[in-house]
Amino acid sequence: MQKKLKYLVFTNMLFGFISFHQICAAQTPLPAVDPIKAGFSHDGLKRIDGFFATEINENRLPGAVLAVAKNGKLAIYKSYGYQDPITKQPMPKNAIFNLASMTKVMATVGALTMYEEGKFTLNDPVTNWFEQFKDVKVGQVNPDGTVTTQAVKRMITVQDLMRHTNGLTYGARSNTPIHKLSMPSSATAALTYDGNQFISQLANTPLLYEPGTAWDYSFGIDVLGLIEEKIDGQPLDKVLQNRIWQKLKMVDTGFSIKDRSRLAKPFANDPLTGKPQKIEVVDKPVKFDCGGSCAFSTAADYLRFGQMLLNQGELNGARVLSPNTVKLMTSDHLGDNIKNQLAGTEPGRAGYGFGLGVAVRKVRGVAATNGNIGDFTWNGANGTLFWVDPVENLVVVMMAAAPGELRKIYREKVSAVVYGALEK
């Protein structure tokens, strides 16, 4: 196939049948555009390159791939540093990364395609699919450190799963007695339990909050993914393949690594702490397709996914969601009555609300990251990030294998250099 493409490109160039931009379109995730014509400055582009060069040279980042779309065209598509920091193998643009929590956005979109089919309402209780949650309890920490429980006032709903108002907290995010009773994270849960075991374990763990009262990062999307499997009768990998990835030609995305030779690897030790670090799902098989963390992808594939959302649910004639469903997804679902603790999880997300699977900016300012009202985003704990800014008609994807705390700093710095490079 590759030889055939090269032959077609050569013969068509020879006879003048296709242009340079058509060639770029055949090899890149979106049609290419000169970044200067797209509104980026020469100096700004140099600052982006300089930022990545500095971080890599100072051994704070092993390597990265940056893909930026402006006005529906690919303006920036570059790789930096190393795919493997030990062998110094250069980072290819089509390197494969574990998405961690950027999986959540795709799992949410998959569920919303079912919502459009009338398979459920957002107010449906989780007990419609998993009776194990009918006796779920809210935990209360006593002065002596013991935990007592009481029945919930209402059941966890699908909306609670999507917007993280379900109380199903990640154990690794704090050290309270309730956190200590919970599983650490989506990936560790999927490495330990199959789907049924996971649900049973989760339903028997006290909730940190009464459902619908507080935003707290959670196992909600993992439960949502298992609901999708129940509705479609197949693994989440197949669900998302049929409903999203195949339509958008996301050829390298899935819950298995499509080509291990392209897998990006992290430093052996955290650059900040010096402690050993690793991405476990890279080396060990998961026991269920966890919608909260376990997918793999490339910058190119995820850029197409982000462009679909910016296009109100469609890309190149392939529709995934209706425009109204995308608007619903990217609106704030917390309002004034739900305790908003986003900034505690994402320091740069003060001033954001939360929609369905994504954080949504409510005001310009407050947040430590640049952007515009209505931009939406989420990131991955292993170093990946993306955001969509409808005001600037901008989609940004940065992929790195950087699981340490430094990743939170990169989220703010990448925002600064990208917006700082825009002149119009």
Image: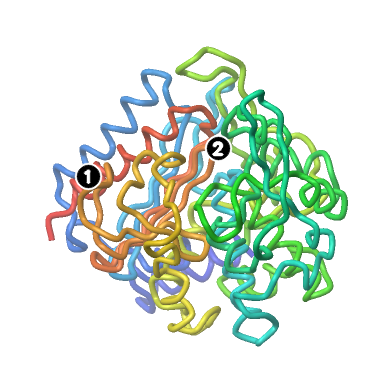
Residue 385 screen position, x and y as percent: 45, 47
Give the vertical position of 195 relative to 394 (above or below): above
| Residue of label 2 | 382
Tell me the residue at 42%/22% (across/down): 60
Instruction: Check disc 2 and give the amino acid type.
Output: Asn
Q: Residue 157 lies in what quarter of the image?
A: bottom right
What is the CA distance from the residue labelled 2 to the residue labelled 1? 25 Å
Q: Is residue 163 left or right of residue 25?
A: right
Residue 275 screen position, x and y as percent: 57, 14
Tell me the residue at 26%/62% (across/down): 373
Residue 149 screen position, x and y as percent: 72, 44
Q: Is residue 341 left or right of residue 52?
A: right
Residue 293 screen position, x and y as percent: 64, 48
Instruction: Check disc 1 and give the amino acid type.
Output: Leu
Give the structural element (helix, strand or loop) at label 1: helix
Q: Residue 45 got which mark? A: 1
Q: Residue 315: in sight, yes or no? A: no
User: Closest to the observer: 127 or 192?
Assistant: 127
Give the structural element (helix, strand or loop) at label 2: loop
Tell me the residue at 76%/62% (across/down): 226
Question: Which quarter shows the N terminus?
Answer: bottom right
Q: Residues within 10 Å of mark 1 (few under 14, many from 20)?
A: some
